[in-house]
Amino acid sequence: MLPRATPAPLDDAPPNGTVVFVTDFGTEDTYVAQMIGALLRTDPRARAVAGYHAVPPQDVPAGAEALGELVAAFPPGTTFVTVVDPGVGTERPILAAAAGGMFHVAPDNGLLAPLLAADPSAEVVRLPQEGSRSRTFHGRDLMTPAAGRLTRGEPLAALGERVSEWVSLDRPAPEQRPDGAVVGRVVRADRFGNLITNVSRRDCPTPAAATVAGRTVPVAGAYGEVVEGEPLALIGSNGRWEIAVRNGSAAAVLNAAAGAAVTFRPAS
């Protein structure tokens, strides 16, 4: 557990009625639609405007990664319901939080840890777990109704007991080597096969080249700066370095996946 001092009340925008879902449910079953129904039953005026349901099953770090990217895209007051919940039905807590100008409901398994750590004034409460229709679908029965209570104007404090500690998330940081090289890891491959790393522009502003899966690739500013089929390293839209192949899949061409080491080398 990550201990935290009792935070001061958040003085940001109230919930704006917009709800974003982040889950590992996929889209082939009715689970997502059931959660939207649960939201509208609780607050008919809420707006379920977006959902990302391609988190790999039970992959909490990937869920936290996706949530972080989406938080950066939405306006203050947005409510996020994030359900990647391997411990569903157990005694693991469920949290509702106000952090960074946003509102969140998620299981206490590390999903919210990066966002809570980034905001010293975050408010967090633990939801009661009584009254769920199913021990296997707390996303529908407990988390989404809590989000609906927020969007209809109930204060965060009314949802549960205030807490000041929660489960942390172990996310390895890039390694800064004495020779100036920065060694990171591939976090995931997107649908284009781009290998997204955990190395930001701040971690490594101006590398000369990158090496992954035994291959050294040039650094460029855009995909079109190399010839078709060739790999490159560049800063992606999320502000982090990625390895790509112009009009191709870096994951396939380089035979690399999540967890692969990527070394960014400085100019000699």
Image (spheres, helix red, strand yellow):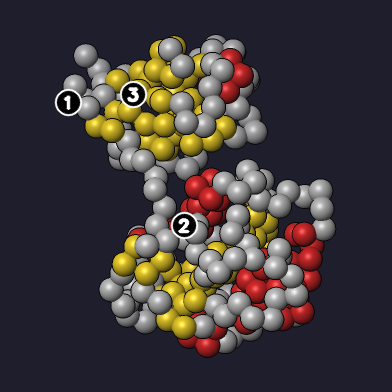
Kindly state the secondary structure of the residue where label 1 is placed. loop
Q: Say what secondary structure mark 2 lies in.
A: loop
* Occupied quadrant, residue 50: bottom right
**Horizontal relation, residue 167 to residue 191: left or right:** left
Label pair 3/2, CB-CB below 8 angstroms: no
Residue 93 seen: yes
First in sequence: mark 2 vs mark 1: 2
Please tell me in which quadrant of the rendered image residue 142 appears.
bottom right
For this view, does 204 lie left or right of residue 242? left
The CA distance from mark 3 to mark 2 is: 28 Å
Question: Which dot, 2 or 1, sits closer to the camera?
Answer: 2
Identify the amino acid type marked 1. Answer: Pro
The amino acid type, in three-letter code, at marker 2 is Gly
Q: Which residue matches tag 1?
A: 178
* Mark 3 vs 2, N-terminal side: 2
The quarter in which the N terminus is drawn is bottom left
Task: Judge by depth and name the residue closer to the eye, 81 or 142.
Answer: 142
Residue 54 horizontal/vertical position (percent): 66, 46
Task: Find the distance from the CA under tag 2 to the CA under tag 1.
Answer: 32 Å
User: Quick check: can you spot residue 13?
Assistant: no
Q: Residue at x 47, y 77 (%)?
A: 125
Residue drawn at (55%, 69%), measured in percent from left and top?
91
Q: Mark 3 points at which residue?
A: 264
Q: Which mark is residue 110?
A: 2
Which numbered dot is residue 66?
none
Q: Is residue 146 above or below residue 220?
A: below
Residue 87 percent across, percent down from the top left: 59, 59
What amino acid is at disc 3?
Answer: Phe
Q: How far apart are marks 1 and 3 (CA)?
A: 13 Å
Circle nearer the viewer, 1 or 3: 1
